[in-house]
Amino acid sequence: KRLAASLANTSVLYVQFHTSLLPKSINLIIYGVACTGSEHVTTWSGLIGVMDEVTDSTALLPVKGSHKKKRLRWIPTCWYVDCLPCIKARYVLAIMAFFGFCNVYALRVNLSVAIVQMTAKHPHHNQRNFDWTNIEKGWVLSSFFYGYIFTQIPGGWIATKFGGKYVFGIGVLVTSVLTLITPQMAYINIWALVAVRVVIGFFEGVTFPASHALFGKWAPPLERSMMTTIALSGPFVGNIIAFPLSGILCETMGWPWVFYIFGFAGIVWFVAWLLLAFNTPADHPRISPEEQHYIESAIHAELLSKQSDSSKDSPPPWKHIFTSPAVWAIVIAHLCNNWGFYTLLTCLPTFLKQTLCLNIAENGFYSAIPYTCLAVVAFTMGQVTDVLRQRKLVSTTVVRKVNSTLGLCLPAIFLLLCGFYGSNTTWAITFLSLSVGCVGFAVSGFNINHLDIAPKYAGILMGISNMFATIPGFVGPQVANMIARKPSYESCSDDCSDPKIINIYREEWTMVFIIAAEVYAFGAISYLLLASGKKQPWADGYIVSNSSSKFGKDPCLERVSNDKPTKLVNT
């Protein structure tokens, strides 16, 4: 009876949600069950009176604090009711971004598995296959990055100026639609396939800068590592799903279904994204006043208030951005990390096929194991990093440098071990899993350092670093395919059973891994020398001088500058 009474008292808060969706008679039953035994409603006549009063009410749900959302007449009441009060709005955004990046990487890497089946000598399911050389396969695999590189900075700028919700969403939507027509483009000719992959890369290039622009307005400083690693674990989980599922689809239904299934999944995600994601906390119709105030206070609410309207639309300080050592530390580390990461991302199935002679289903399964390790390490380090910073055990600069160094040096070591000692499936997969898994340290390092040094321009900074970091995407696979190729392989049987050919490929892939390890090491040294975890003087669009702040002291932040901002001369 006590439980029923408690349910009755609680259900009053949600009765508007029920009345907006269900007929009154059904609401009476639902509400009556909840109110059974309540001291407030003892008879059905009393219950009907309560329901009439609530149904006729147009007031919003009672909330604490003074922040009230302005309700529009044409929007249903349920739009303003939080159906998942146990999950904070900012984490709903992070989770939706997680699933968005799952789709993004599934749409990106599905071709890496499918191309093994597309160029097989013995077609499955009477499908059309292609007689492409290794150089042509290199062009197909790297074509995505030729479009990807051009929308990094524009994507960050557009997301910063107009909001990241639609930039991110439309990028995934167009990528999904184009993925659906990829098989038809391949049937036309190789260059039609290359063209559509370039366009896919062009639209997908806005996603990472747009996500950083969103988190610049949604992630409180002491939760940045946690929220960002939740979202940025999406690519790794996308790889975990895409690699084995692509192998299974190729084996059972044919390679075109790899593109159909993932393309449709991206469209479904886009619909959910439109309903659940918003540019700022102030735009969110269901966020609690307490959470909105906490977020806006923690990341300097002046960016959203009337006080900052004049500086909100001011152009970014480009000169200071491109001459900042902290920015170049991120750029170099990002570029060097992506050399090894993209080489394996696009060529791992080919490596497993050439050196270990795995079939397409085994290939997809083993290709997913390294990215499972990566997702676990990335998510774990995000939580550990935030705990260390919240307890003030280490500074932001130290934790970013340590994570980035581990995320660059350990993958280099394990790649070398794979090249020299990965002569069988067990050792090769073990060393590759450790190499790719240790990249997860960098997710809490340079990968979110943009938000530390300039949260207002995080989207633009991500666009700059990701633009340079895209270069390994089309250079790395080409280098790998040029090194790891022998004309005699073309005349070999499709199961590559000749031990001499396998040994040649192992030697050549060892050279590929040595080059990647050297690039990793250069990135680690550069980041250690140049990086910073402190907010830069130009981060708000003005230079800081020593005097009192016109914004006042923010009680929600412990380390807010009391300096008076002076407008920066734009260059």
Image: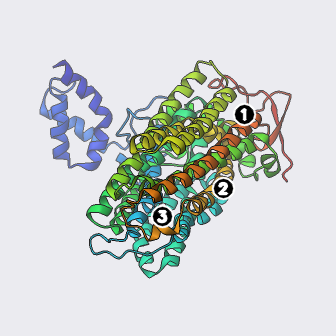
Instruction: Give the residue drawn at x 35%, y 49%.
Output: 365
Looking at the picture, does residue 277 appear above or below residue 68? below
The residue singled out by tag 3 in the image is 175
Of residues 189 and 119, the one drawn nearer to the viewer in this rendering: 119
Q: Position of residue 23 (x, y in %)?
A: 20, 49
- Quarter of the picture containing the N terminus is top left
Q: CA distance from mark 2 to mark 3?
A: 18 Å
Instruction: Give the residue drawn at x 64%, y 29%.
Output: 402
> In what element is the residue under mark 1?
helix
The answer to whether 457 appears left or right of 257 in the picture is right
Amino acid residing under circle 2: Met
The image quadrant that residue 518 belongs to is top right
Of residues 248 and 144, the one drawn nearer to the viewer in this rendering: 248
Say whether disc 2 or disc 3 marks the residue closer to the N-terminus: 3
Of residues 389 and 307, the one drawn nearer to the viewer in this rendering: 389
Mark 3 or 1, closer to the camera: 1
Of residues 491 and 562, the one drawn nearer to the viewer in this rendering: 491
Single out the residue that lies furthest toward the front: 500
The answer to whether 569 appears left or right of 182 in the picture is right
Looking at the picture, does residue 483 appear above or below residue 64? below
Looking at the picture, does residue 369 appear above or below residue 314? above
Label of residue 528 in the image = 1
Q: CA distance from mark 2 to mark 1?
A: 21 Å
- The answer, for residue 256, to whether it is visible in the render is yes
Q: Residues within 10 Å of mark 1 (few under 14, many from 20)?
A: some
The residue singled out by tag 2 in the image is 467
Q: Number of marks in the image?
A: 3
The image quadrant that residue 88 belongs to is top left
Looking at the picture, does residue 451 appear above or below residue 253? above
Instruction: Give the residue drawn at x 17%, y 45%.
Output: 26
Instruction: Give the residue drawn at x 54%, y 43%.
Output: 420
> In what element is the residue under mark 2?
helix
